[in-house]
Amino acid sequence: LGFASAGLAIAMKDMFMSMLGWCVIIFGGSFRVGDRVKVFQNDTTYIGDIIDISFLRITLYEELTLETYSKHRRSGRIIFIPNNYVFTNLLANYTHHGMKTVLDGIDISVTFDSNLDKAQEIVENIVTRHAKGYTELARKNIARLQHEYSIKNPKVEPRFFMFFEHWGMRISA
């Protein structure tokens, strides 16, 4: 009887951990239906919207990303994630507590024979102009989060970096 109980406990470990994970998810408030999340599992990354949280798993509607397109040539799959993943894998929540902004990046390639200073000036002007409304929204969202978390001096304004490549310069914004 003792060995059978131990064997059953080992066999049911993942299920029990998923039930405990459900408690952490529901009562911890880290994830809700409708949140946009990124899940890292081994060498695969899934990004999508949570469409259901059940006792044993999170159901995710997969979003089209560069990775899903280049690796699988498809997206829109329904991904089932065991709740025990909250203990063993990294899950990033893009919309935690109503966050509506994600700091994103874009790369612009410029050859060495181009006017690099002018290219950087043009990129900075365009990005700053188009990010203006989002920058203010991000500032307000982070200010709201500062009441719950210790976030000091958040920088939400666009930042720019230049990288040497073998063909020219890469301006990252």
Image (cartoon, rainbow, N blue to C red):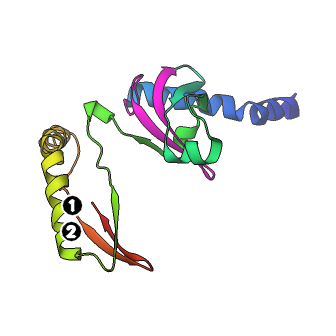
Q: Position of residue 25 (x, y in %)?
A: 45, 29
Label 1 environment density (alpha carbons within 10 Å; few <14, some 14–19, many ≥20):
some
Q: Which residue is at 76% across, 36% downward?
A: 10
Residue type at tag 1: Val
- The total number of labels drawn is 2
Q: Could you tell me which quadrant the C terminus lies in?
A: bottom left
Q: Position of residue 19 (x, y in %)?
A: 58, 26
Q: Which residue is at 57% across, 33% downward?
A: 75
> Is residue 107 in view from this perspective?
yes
Residue range corresponding to the magenta coloring? 29-52
In the foreground, 55 or 164 = 164
Would you say 128 lies left or right of 40 here?
left
Please report contact status of discs 2 and 1: CB closer than 8 Å, yes or no.
yes
Q: Position of residue 49 (x, y in %)?
A: 45, 29
Which image quadrant for residue 133?
top left
Would you say 52 lies left or right of 151 here?
right
Q: Quickly name the residue at label 2.
A: 120
Would you say 100 lies left or right of 62 here?
left
Q: Which residue is at 84% across, 32% downward?
A: 2
Residue type at tag 2: Gln
